């Protein structure tokens, strides 16, 4: 699936220029960028519901789609809503039971009128509906919005199972960077009217002696970390410090040093957090 030399404008406002992208099968992509940069616009172009772009889309056909304004028939049950989707798309209705199982909705819940569902369950049905597609691609715009932590965990597991079982490609646009970084394979950062791909969040840090320390206090704490004799140097982005360790130094030694010097911290990653990548590429 490829996007070649994509351009798009809203009137005189240029959103994309010369955007090129290849989407690989069986891969989960995280689409990130500042508000208003064009993430939803890009999803809509790929989905074929936003005309007026220039360039070429190839090998993309009838993707499953969840947008923030996706609606259901409130007077029908959840099950009936998904059956309608199957009829519209020519999909075997037995697929409804499969996708509802993925998002942990049993028969009794599926038999309720859609108006009775909480926002969390509406999101489950939205994602289930996006899975009902004959195409090879699923596009999700803010799928974890307004749902609780447990539901987010369930939906992330559902996405991983879906991709493993079908080999389809999933693109997730989200502001919840800490959530999507756990399941994506590739980060797509939208900035300067184009998209840049990064694999950093899906692999170990290229420098194995680098730790990404999320501080529990203000970034000025970096002044203390910069004095740590166990580190070569540090770089602070927001409340995350990229700390480059001296040879033979372990993360445990760094933690002991921070505890001794009363430096508050929340977590330590050996992989580059998506939040850090986002902040360093969208300035």
Image (cartoon, rainbow, N blue to C red):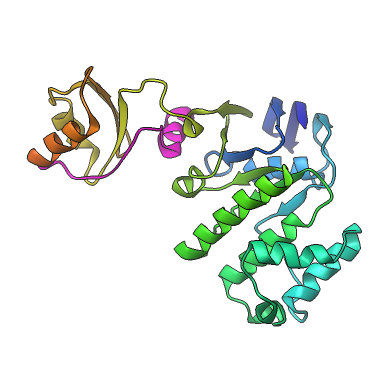
Query: What residue occupies the far left of the structure in this picture?
Result: 260
Q: Nearer the viewer, residue 216 or 200?
A: 200
Residue 30 place in picture, x, y as percent: 58, 40
Report if residue 269 lies within the magenta region.
yes
* Residue at 48% over, 30% down: 203
* Residue at 67% over, 66% down: 101
Answer left or right for 93 relative to 217.
right
Residue 192 place in picture, x, y as percent: 58, 27
Q: Nearer the viewer, residue 216 or 185?
A: 185
The quarter of the rendered structure image containing the C terminus is top left
Q: In this rendering, is residue 153 above or below 242?
A: below
Answer left or right for 272 relative to 236.
right
User: In which quadrant of the rendered view does residue 125 lie?
Assistant: bottom right
Report if residue 189 lies within the magenta region.
no
Magenta extent: 262-283
Residue 10 place in picture, x, y as percent: 72, 39
């Amino acid at each position: 699936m490829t996007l070649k030399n994509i351009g798009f404008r809203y009137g005189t406002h240029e959103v994309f220029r010369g955007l090129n992208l290849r989407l690989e099968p069986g891969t989960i992509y995280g689409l990130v960028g500042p508000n208003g940069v064009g993430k939803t616009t890009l999803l809509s172009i790929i989905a074929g519901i936003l005309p007026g772009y220039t360039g070429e889309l190839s090998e993309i056909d009838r993707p499953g789609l969840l947008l923030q304004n996706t609606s259901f028939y409130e007077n029908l049950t959840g099950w009936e809503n998904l059956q309608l989707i199957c009829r519209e798309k020519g999909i075997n209705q037995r697929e409804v039971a499969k996708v509802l199982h993925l998002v942990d909705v049993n028969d009794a819940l599926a038999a309720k009128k859609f108006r009775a569902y909480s926002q969390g369950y509406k999101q489950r049905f939205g994602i289930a509906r996006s899975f009902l597609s004959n195409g090879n691609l699923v596009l999700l715009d803010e799928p974890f919005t307004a749902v609780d932590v447990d539901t987010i965990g369930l939906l992330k597991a559902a996405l991983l199972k879906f991709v493993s079982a079908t080999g389809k490609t999933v693109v997730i646009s989200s502001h919840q960077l800490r959530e999507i970084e756990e399941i994506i394979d590739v980060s797509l950062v939208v900035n300067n009217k184009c998209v840049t791909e990064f694999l950093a969040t899906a692999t170990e840090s290229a420098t194995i002696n680098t730790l990404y320390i999320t501080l529990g206090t203000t970034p000025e704490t970096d002044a203390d970390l910069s004095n740590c004799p166990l580190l070569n140097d540090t770089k602070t982005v927001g409340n995350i410090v990229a700390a480059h360790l001296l040879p033979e130094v372990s993360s445990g030694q760094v933690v002991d040093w921070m505890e001794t010097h009363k430096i508050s911290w929340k977590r330590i990653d050996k992989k580059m957090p998506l939040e850090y990548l986002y902040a360093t590429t969208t300035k």
